[in-house]
Amino acid sequence: MLEKVELLAPVGSEESLYAAVENGADAVYLGGKLFNARQYASNFSNEELKEVVQYCHIRQVKVYITVNILLDNNEINEIIDYILYLYNIDVDGIIVQDLGLSNIIRTVLPDFEVHASTQMTINNYMGAKFVEDMGFKRAVLARELSVGEIEYISNTTNIELEGFIHGALCVSYSGQCLMSSIIGGRSGNRGRCAQPCRMPYTFINDEGEVLQGYNNKYLLSPKDLNTIDNLDKIINSGIVSLKIEGRMKRPEYVATIVKNYKKALTNIISNNTKDVSQKDKKDIKQIFNRGFTKGFILGKDNRDFISYDKPNNRGIYIGKVINTDKSYIYIKLIEDLNLGDGIELRNDDVSFGLKVSEILLNDRSVTGGSKGDIVKIKRVNSKGNKDLEVYKTSDIKLLERAKLSYVEDSNKTTIPVFMNIEIKIDRSIKLHLWDNINYISIESEEKVEQARRVSLKEDKVKKQMGKLGNTPYHLQHIDIDIEDNAMVSLSVLNRLRRRAVTQLNEKRANSNNREYTTKDNIVSKFNGIIASNSELNNTDRGLISVKVDNIEQFKRLNLDKLDRVYINFHDDINNCINEVKNHNKEAYFYTGKILSNLDFKNLKTTIDSLERLDGVSVSNLGTLKFVKDNYNINIHGDIGLNIFNSYTMKFLYDYGVDSGTLSPELTLKQVSNIAKGGPMLKETYGYGYLPVMVTKYCPFSLIRKCKDSTNCGDCSYKKGFGLRDRKGMTFNIKRKNNTTIIYNSQPLLALEHINNIYDSGVNMIRLDFTMEKDEVEDIQDIFFEYANKNIRKDEVIKFIDKYRQKTGFTKGHYFRGVL
């Protein structure tokens, strides 16, 4: 089974493709110009994608294309054309986030391999089973899983598992981050993340006081994942595809990381117990690092997870500034330094970088200095003070060495091929060419002549047929059957060889042996999906739902002025449900976005104990499957399911989801396009602090000095703290069920627009209470009264103005949308 383990490399440019393949990648993942979660990578046009597939397949490398964003209704026709194109150019598989698109592909192209993107938040065995049931071939698991959790998933499912092994980490569960979207309109779910996690924040308490040592630190910026020393543990957990992150990285990075992980993987497969060399580890660190962590897959120490002092490349420490003068900085080296290297000089107060353009050793110009040397480099500013530490952030020799591994004139990929050639007078030449799978048999158009003076010799034939230098092949062996006194021009042999190689390339490139499919072949199936997607709309209108996070908030509710309550606590819950039902209202138990493998046992105990419950709200695909499989009860799909188009909504409804909260990233116009079709009861936010991040990482571990955030237990730091950004906005934090939720700095308040929201086809407007206390009654009251036309708009405007002065608010994306 080890032989089937795949090393999967990132490709964001043509050079990165060559770097990945030539350094040993078994598969690559990349995106087209549209519909992928790395819109700021170079990416590939359709014609370039076709060339990529041919290049890779000839070299027995698989190609997976990322189509891993949420899709607007208006994009569905275009993306079906794109998916069909990918199918016809023989792409091996596509990586998808959107449930609606996944269902369409399963319906119209059932033999096209689909992978569940990490954006789908597959973090438990039930989630893996869900996508397995949908027909996915592979699940790209959440980065937050440990090897033990992965092993449990592997043992309880049959789906292929893919996991990250190296590169940048997201601090939030992928697919559950709205921070970039809410702050600046650039959605990670749409491939436009602005990385607000890499910005500085200040840790404050509920009094607004700065926690000592945590002012203006990079509190949400993870170190880079590095698992090369423990690759065997990851493979043994059941991972079959080892994924390197880095589609935004330079090709030299791809070359260096792929090369060294391939070496480590080969050692494991061949039972070679040799450790990764210190030189290889140093190259990995030098090419790029934010500091390294084993992540949650191998470690539990929160304090080892975040790069608090620096969000970008740290480089390698190479020495210290020991003196300065007007023109030069004097550095005592502990590592080599060469012309062309990039360095950074820094201490607690200052940091600046430069490219080394001159090195003086004993006042003589040199190309480099070595360990122990005191070298001088030119000052570039007045900041070059004594005692600055010096870090090499770019190593020119490593970059040159990496580039040599993939540049065209040093192509390293060589595939053994075999030939048999028959040269008989007055007959066409017969050439047979084969590799380990494919067989080519061709004949020359020209006939072999009898030699007049000099006949063709066997060694000349062998030399000409072995001229494969501009191809990925080398001639392993050739059998030559040549008649005495036969003669043919060398140009004939060359043409014959080239024709055979071209045919071999074509066979290798079409590795999936698909028949070309047109849109006409699938249009009836696709039209069937469109028709079923426009069924009678649910006509309920003007409903109000309320979510409460604690029993104190619940006690403040007026149960006559709502239609549904989501209860997100356990205290005295049955009495609370009874009180809701006594008012003839709906009671739903609210479940979070993240449930672990072990949480389902506790969830079952809880649901089994609840009397008169109307339904369960789910925000995780695993939770959805668990509730569907175990209970005959109403299911509400919350924002964690990312309902961004009517195709997702229809799929979920057919699966058993009776009502759903539409994505808060949708505009009112997009909501209208979705909400006016299909029988599901639609809900959107009217009020609430939106959860902008959901993370396993616990910032409170900084205060408590605890190492293990995977089993927090009771924590006195579960609320009352926040992160203040550089603009002075505070994002409140809660810790619950081993998960940290970070909320937007301002609540969404769409009160004056609720009639427009209802008119769009939305049935229910949601009031989401998280940190509120005294405000609960007033907010609930005015929403209910305005929804029921019991108060005038001027009273609403007055309330809004008062609220604006108190806390400020946002209208979310109803009127601005996301990129």
Image (cartoon, grey):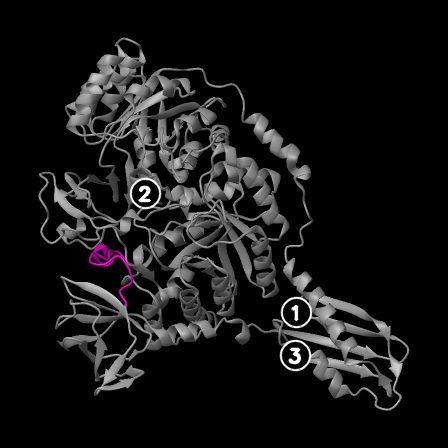
Answer above or below: position of 809 versus 23: above
Side of 736 where 189 appears, left or right: right
In primary-sequence order, the first of circles 1 and 3 is 1
Residue wearing tag 2: 180
Residue wearing tag 1: 436
Q: Estimate the spatial distance between the alpha carbons at disc 2 and disc 3, rounded to whole Å.
A: 54 Å
In primary-sequence order, the first of circles 2 and 3 is 2
Q: Is residue 619 visible?
A: no
The residue located at (82%, 70%) in the rendering is 443
Q: Is mark 1 in CB contact (under 8 Å) with mark 3? A: no
Front residue of this view, candidates 356 and 57: 356
Front residue of this view, candidates 804 and 360: 360
Side of 140 where 579 appears, left or right: left
Q: Which residues are magenta?
A: 299-315
Estimate how packed mark 2 is, as few (under 14), some (14 to 19) or many (20 or more) residues with alpha carbons within 10 Å: many
Q: Estimate the spatial distance between the alpha carbons at disc 1 and disc 2, rounded to whole Å.
A: 49 Å
Image spot of residue 31 (x, y percent): 49, 51
Is 300 covered by the magenta stretch?
Answer: yes
Q: Amino acid at mark 3?
A: Gln
The residue located at (77%, 80%) in the rendering is 490
